[in-house]
Amino acid sequence: MEYKISKNAKITSSILILVGIIALVIGLTSGHGHHTSQRFWANLLVNGYFFFTISLAALFFLALQYVSQMAWGVTTHRVFQAIMSFMPIGAIVLLIVFIAGAAHIHHLYHWMDPELYVKGGAHYDEIIANKQAYLNTPFFLIRSVIYIAVWMFFAYWLRKKSKEEDALNLAAYADGVSPIYKKSIFMGVLFIFFFAYTSSSSAWDWLMSIDTHWFSTMFGWYSFSGMWVSSMIVAVVLVLYLKSKGYLKEVNDSHIHDLGKWLFAISCLWSYLWFSQFMLIWYSDIPEEVTYYIDRFEHYKLLYVGTFFVNFLLPFFILMSRDAKRNAIFLLPVALIIFIGHWIDVLVMVLPGTMHEEGSLGLVEIGMFLTFLGGFIFAVLTSLSKASLQTKNHPMYDESVHLHH
Amino acid sequence: MADKKIYAIYDDDYVLLESAKHLVSKGIFIRDVFSPFPIHGLDPVIGLKRTRIAITAFIYGMIGVSLALTGMWFFSIQDWPMNIGGKPNFSLWDNLPAFIPVTFEFGVLCAAHGMAITYLLRNWTLPGFKAHNPYLRTTDDRFVMEIHPHDNSVSAEDIKALINETCVLEIDEK
């Protein structure tokens, strides 16, 4: 079945972009000088990262479906492929932020300041200077380009081959199994191998290096679980939206139950990692480690601690029951609230290190979020309309259609 | 004297499932099925209700969480305030992060053990209890339906005639 973007969806995403830009402009013009420019770039990083990694985690989940030969999710392959489609835009935004940082247009990345490395200079910082072998601007840019290029190659390949698979004539093959499916498993393995390292190292580079002195061995997994749960939220909401419009007839209650289980499980994983990172640092109370939390507890306490409780308790208690996971009345509000929650989570990863005590959740933040959200919705729905909503010739397609538990 | 129970013995789970559908469509009430492994899709056919073990697991988990928190509050705050690593010990809330791992583990422990014991008790299969499956081979390669004539309006002979319409291996009475 083909999907066509409805007029309402187009208007809604345009309104989101428009309202977002107006809020952004009002917010920026009412601010002042250096502070405003830093705030603008910080928000560009937050939203570029948040929406880019939603697409990235969708790619991860699609690859995971191939690698684990997951049968139930075949009817949702096109949904995850559509979520991947924001990657190019997100990648451009992120690269602009990184290049602008390297050109000293903004100061999100404190360590990009060359004076920190001048021995005996007034700004010499021994801790940062010791990290120079890894944390230097050229290597940072090269790494970022490699991550993004390789991830996008896999996204492009899986999407392209999945469309090619639709046109295959399976009778022409001796074993009746699509050769593209077998190749996709192999490519999925390669991607997950690469992603296992780069999901962590990209989080260190792009987010953890903002608080340059600070480090946490759990940070990679923590931000990875955040992007994964955000991506599952988008998948759930998109599937429910499409079903309410009469599409995706092949997706039944059991599929929605399974997606709900992922939402529940990855929310718990995220909460576990958030708390573990916090608890170990709180317990040992070493000055070089607690700085990160002191910044957040002094100026961002409600946002930081509040989102943890919302993102953990809401899905945990509401989605625990089997019936709630199958029912849009429970699933949708929880998904939408913790979507905002996980966006605030990224916001509080970036703002304290870049805006210090001056950061807040104001017009600029909301405007930038709405602009990106509108663009994201439009990109995903456009991509969804470019291919049939169901794959053909996937060996486990029938099994997925008959999923029942 | 009570009626004898009728046992229909099959050698395949799918055949049993189809036979159960056939018998139920004729209005026969199947009391129980013995099988070496769970048979997918059988529960709704023979009218089994959804298990409530998940609800008990939640209750046991909450009991574990409350017990752990109360215990730690009493041991290290109320009865004998302990200063470990300079952590605040004035109230439960101040020291909560340190208590969470134990609370979590104890919650899982209580939920898992409570659930397992409840399950074994409900099935009357706790260690040391006499097994009451009618045929030992239902733990290996046989699938058996148990039908009580007094559950049904038709006579035992009619039930057996209906069972014979299915691909049954053997009909037995005990």
Image (spheres, coloured by chain):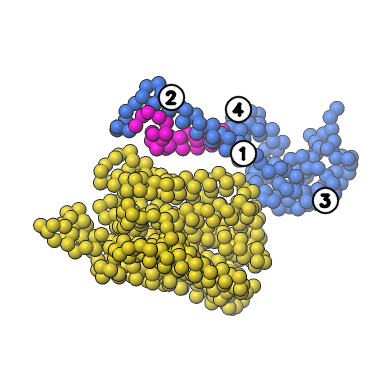
Q: CA distance from mark 1 to mark 3?
A: 32 Å
Which secondary structure dominates the residues rendered in magenta? Answer: helix
| Residue at which label 3 appears | B25
Q: Are marks 4 and 3 in contact (CB under 8 Å)?
A: no
Task: Determine the secondary structure under disc 3.
Answer: helix
Above or below residue A6? Residue A76 is above
Q: CA distance from mark 4 to mark 3?
A: 39 Å
Q: Colour of chain B?
A: blue
Q: Are marks 4 and 1 on the same chain?
A: yes
Is residue A20 a member of the stretch shown in magenta? no
Say whether residue A116 is visible.
Answer: yes
Q: Earlier in the sequence, mark 1 or mark 3?
A: 3
Measuring 42% from the left and 55% from the top, which residue is drawn there? A361
Q: Earlier in the sequence, mark 2 or mark 1?
A: 1
Where's residue A233, x and y in %? Answer: 52, 57
Neighbourhood count class around disc 2 (C-alpha, 10 Å): few under 14, some 14–19, many 20 upward: some
**Colour yellow maps to chain:** A
Q: Are marks 4 and 3 on the same chain?
A: yes
Image quadrant assignment for residue B85: top left
Amino acid tagged 1? Ile
Is B22 on the left-hand or right-hand side of A22? Answer: right
| Residue at which label 4 appears | B128
Given the image, what chain letter belongs to the residue carrying mark 3?
Answer: B
Given the image, what chain letter belongs to the residue carrying mark 1?
Answer: B
Query: Residue extending furthest top?
Result: B79
Q: Which mark is residue B29?
A: none
Q: What stretch of residues is rendered in magenta?
A: B88-116
Q: Which mark is residue B74?
A: 2
